[in-house]
């Protein structure tokens, strides 16, 4: 009897009309640089768990090869909002473009630098990168900047190694396996796959607070949601809806198990090895923001990173207070 009533209920559910779309739904074009990467997990969760729909956002997600390309799309007007590295807001301000973050997604970069296993005896640190080829998601992206910063900290010049764009997924893994690159600056699950297969030896790991402090000397906010200030002014309600969806996503990630996260993302993100993806999630869980707001220390740390890498920014006047607009996330996180 219970089974029959269950089946009847299931049939009724199947026949029930879909929930009507919200009358106040807004369409928002979102740019991202390598959606399967765990760096951008809050975006995928907001999409897959229906948080955008709940908040009345029809999200059109455009996946670009790296964060630098997402930024170009925002400046060019083909996307409204970007999930990307916080440092882009600082760079844009120095160029007279008012781009602001509205929600922190990652409190640590979660970027890992590893060397090809057969070179591990000769390339022991970033000081040994001179003349080497380093795979990054895309030149100008945060993976690229982290590699350059590590080289500068080790006494080299940022131009002492060739940075090769290998994309955000299977192409990056293939480039390392074929020996096309000597080292890689990348993210999970790409790093987890290369580690599990014994292809790389990790030398720098910013998935944890300890590893982040070791390289940057402090916390270093990473992925954020950012947009142009004039878009915020003209679309304040839409901005709030987008931030609300990301806030739900951050809260869900903190409460979820790695297995639940693996079950929620598209199976293609697992690279054919779900247990490995679960491990990658475990490795990166510490890096996600708990509050949606970066610390002042972290923002100053990113400014130092950008100034170190870009001589043009040495004398630029940067007001960090205008790189992050916290009113939306304060409402969203409650």
Image (cartoon, rainbow, N blue to C red):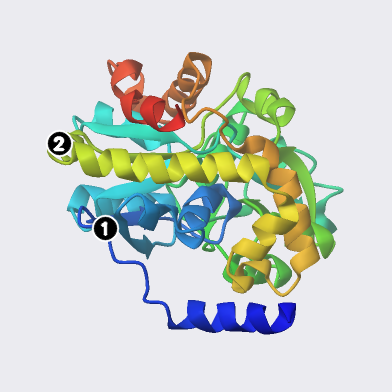
The structure residue drawn at horizontal position 41% and vertical position 34%, both measured from the top left corner, is 103
Task: Kindly state the secondary structure of the residue where label 1 is placed.
Answer: loop
Q: Residue 205 versus residue 287: which sits nearer the camera?
A: 287
Q: Position of residue 98 (x, y in %)?
A: 21, 31
Residue 244, how many percent across, how many down?
A: 39, 40
Relative to 302, say whether 15 is above or below. below
Q: Residue furthest front?
A: 1
| In the image, residue 171 above or below residue 252 | below
Q: Which picture quadrant has residue 331?
A: top left
Which residue lies under the disc numbered 1?
22
Density class for disc 1 (Cα within 10 Å; few <14, some 14-19, many ≥20) is few
Q: Name the spot of residue 197 as percent of width and height, x first.
A: 82, 65
Is label 1 or label 2 in front? 1
Locate residue 193 relative to residue 139 in the image: left or right: right
Quadrant that contains the C terminus? top left
State the SS at label 2: helix
Vertical comparison of 113 with 11: above or below: above
Residue drawn at x 38%, y 50% as measured from the top left = 68
- Residue 6 position in % (x across, y down): 65, 78
The front one of 99 and 248 is 248
Residue 39 tag number:
none
Q: Quadrant of residue 229?
A: top left
Q: Of residues 203 and 235, which is closer to you in this image?
A: 235
Q: Is residue 176 left or right of 66 when viewed as pictured? A: right
Question: Residue 212: in sight, yes or no?
Answer: yes
Q: Say which residue label 2 marks.
A: 230
Mark with earlier residue (1, 2): 1
Query: Could you tell me which residue is drawn at 69 percent across and 57 percent down?
Result: 260
């Amino acid at each position: 009897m219970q089974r029959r009533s269950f089946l009847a209920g299931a049939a009724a559910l199947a026949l029930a009309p879909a929930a009507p779309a919200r009358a106040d739904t807004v369409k928002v074009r979102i740019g991202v640089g390598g959606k399967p990467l765990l760096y951008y997990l809050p975006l995928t969760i907001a999409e897959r768990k229906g948080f955008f729909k709940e908040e009345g956002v029809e999200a059109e997600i455009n996946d670009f090869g790296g964060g630098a390309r997402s930024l170009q799309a925002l400046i060019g007007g083909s996307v409204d909002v970007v999930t990307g590295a916080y440092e882009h807001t600082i760079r844009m301000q120095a160029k007279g473009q008012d781009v602001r973050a509205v929600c922190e997604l990652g409190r640590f970069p979660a970027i890992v630098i590893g060397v090809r296993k057969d070179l591990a005896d000769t390339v022991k640190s970033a000081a040994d990168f001179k003349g080497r080829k380093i795979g990054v998601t895309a030149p100008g992206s945060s993976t690229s900047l982290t590699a350059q910063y590590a080289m500068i900290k080790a006494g080299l010049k940022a131009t002492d190694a060739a940075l090769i764009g290998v994309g955000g997924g299977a192409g990056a893994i293939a480039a390392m396996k074929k020996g096309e690159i000597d080292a890689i600056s990348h993210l999970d699950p790409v790093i987890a796959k290369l580690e599990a297969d014994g292809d790389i030896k990790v030398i720098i790991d910013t998935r944890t607070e300890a590893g982040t402090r070791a390289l940057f000397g402090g916390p270093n906010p990473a992925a954020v949601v950012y947009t142009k200030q004039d878009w915020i002014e003209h679309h304040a309600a839409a901005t709030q809806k987008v931030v609300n969806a990301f806030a739900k996503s951050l809260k869900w990630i903190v409460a979820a198990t790695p297995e639940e996260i693996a079950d929620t993302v598209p199976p293609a993100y697992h690279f054919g090895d779900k247990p490995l993806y679960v491990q990658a999630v475990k490795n990166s869980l510490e890096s996600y923001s708990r509050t949606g707001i970066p610390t002042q220390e972290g923002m100053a740390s990113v400014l130092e990173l950008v100034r170190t890498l870009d001589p043009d920014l040495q004398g630029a006047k940067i007001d960090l207070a205008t790189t992050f607009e916290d009113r939306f996330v304060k409402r969203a996180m409650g």
